[in-house]
Amino acid sequence: MQGEDPFEQGTASILRQPKAVWATAGASVVAFMGIGLVDPILPSIAKGLEATPSQVSLLFTSYFLITAVAMLVTGFVSSRIGGRKTLLAGLALVVVFAALSGTSSSVAELVGFRAGWGLGNALFVSTALAVIVGAAAGGSSAAILLYESALGLGMACGPLLGALLGDASWRYPFFGTAALMAIGFVCITAFLKEQPKPARKTSLLDPIKALGHRGLASVATSAFFYNYAFFTILAFTPFVLNMTPYKSGAVFFAWGLLLAVFSVLVAPRLQKRFGSLKVVGASLVLLAADLVILGYGNHTTAIVCTIVSGAFIGMNNTVYTELALGVSDAPRPVASAGYNFVRWFAAAAAPYLAPKIEEWSNIHIPFVVAAVAAVIGAVVVWVRRSALTHEAEELEPKHATEDGVTVFAG
């Protein structure tokens, strides 16, 4: 109908998807749950394994460090064995290493098992985006919204599951995740058919070469600083709040809900009105202000600011994803791999550095450093705005494949 809101059309199209898309999206929710799962139980893990906060934070560092490096491998693998097999391989690794994490007798063991978990998650999550883009009805905008919905729901439910199971034992959330990912494995096996392999196989160096594009390099650089701020909140704040698993889980559940709402409902509307660059720039500055208030406020203020940060993180996630996939002329799988390769290094660095910075200074400074990182991310967007003008465009159905072959993310 003439005059109908395109966003409303896009939102409606999300609900009309093949079973394969829903199976992949459902498994993606569980995969993203694994990121925030340990948030409410970080203090419990530290107590149970007699570890310091900086030691326990290595659970994030090992996970995301392997994830970052694995981004160079995912496209290489999926272009050779196909998207379905890559998804199943990733799910299988997560099931195995999540279960092993629950059996850990030391922090060193748990950190090692989380690294294996990160490899499986990288194989699954990066390939899932391209499978959803290739199979979803409604073009890439609907597919990205569906993917971001899975991300937001997973981020919200992860801390909740961690709290519910972790109240009895810090080991139970790991076993719970393994069971849920096993269900995802069955669903992918049942509903997703193998998609054609790309005509050209992706090399390990293709994502690095793609970063030679000024626009993609700018997005990745800005996202690197943004992710440092993001994961300072995710990995360091639980120690600052120092709450029971239930209370901490409730805080991060509310945080995740705001993340989901703003990534799926608010960000697209603001992008349509103001443009992607203004939205991400303003959101980064507001996130920086929120971090400073969080760092210097009292306990109640810290809780409120933690929850509110979910809104800014949700908007940034959506805009960055669209920019990374559409700003360069590189194939989407290659562009995604290069972008994720850069940004996940910050996700690995922040959980390790934040507790160390507190040890070297005081509890406020880690948040100040994170706020500065967010501002630097906004400055990069402003300075390189001319290279970022080609925002992610709607992927028409006729372009859903390249040379007749579905594209896979890396």
Image (cartoon, helix red, strand yellow):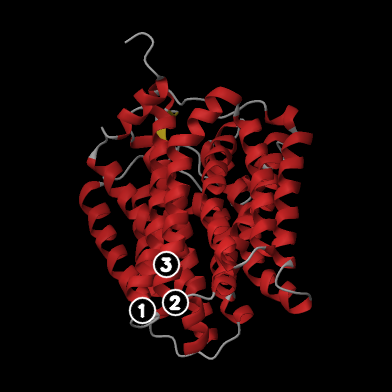
- Nearer-the-camera pick, 286 or 174: 286
Which numbered mark, 1 or 2, is in the foreground of this view? 2
**Dot 2 lies on which element?**
loop
Q: Are marks 1 and 2 in contact (CB under 8 Å)?
A: yes
The image shows residue 275 at horizontal and vertical percentages of: 60, 26
- Nearer-the-camera pick, 143 or 158: 158
| Mark 2 closeness class: few <14, some 14–19, many ≥20 residues within 10 Å | some
Disc 1 marks a residue whose amino acid type is Asp
Q: Which mark is residue 388?
A: none
The image shows residue 401 at horizontal and vertical percentages of: 42, 30
Residue identifier under label 2 = 244
**Dot 3 lies on which element?**
helix
Q: Which mark is residue 167?
A: 1
The image shows residue 254 at horizontal and vertical percentages of: 43, 56
Residue at 23% across, 54% down: 187
> How far separated are the C-alphas under marks 1 and 2?
8 Å
> How far separated are the C-alphas under marks 3 and 1?
10 Å
Disc 2 marks a residue whose amino acid type is Thr
Residue at 26% across, 43% down: 20
Task: From the viewer's perspective, tell me whether residue 295 is left or right of residue 147.
Answer: right
Task: From the viewer's perspective, tell me whether residue 241 is left or right of residue 248.
Answer: right
Disc 3 marks a residue whose amino acid type is Gly
The image shows residue 96 at horizontal and vertical percentages of: 36, 73
> How far separated are the C-alphas under marks 2 and 3?
8 Å
Residue at 43% across, 46% down: 260
Residue identifier under label 3 = 249
Of label 2 and label 3, which has the lower sequence position?
2
Residue at 40% across, 36% down: 143
**Dot 1 lies on which element?**
loop
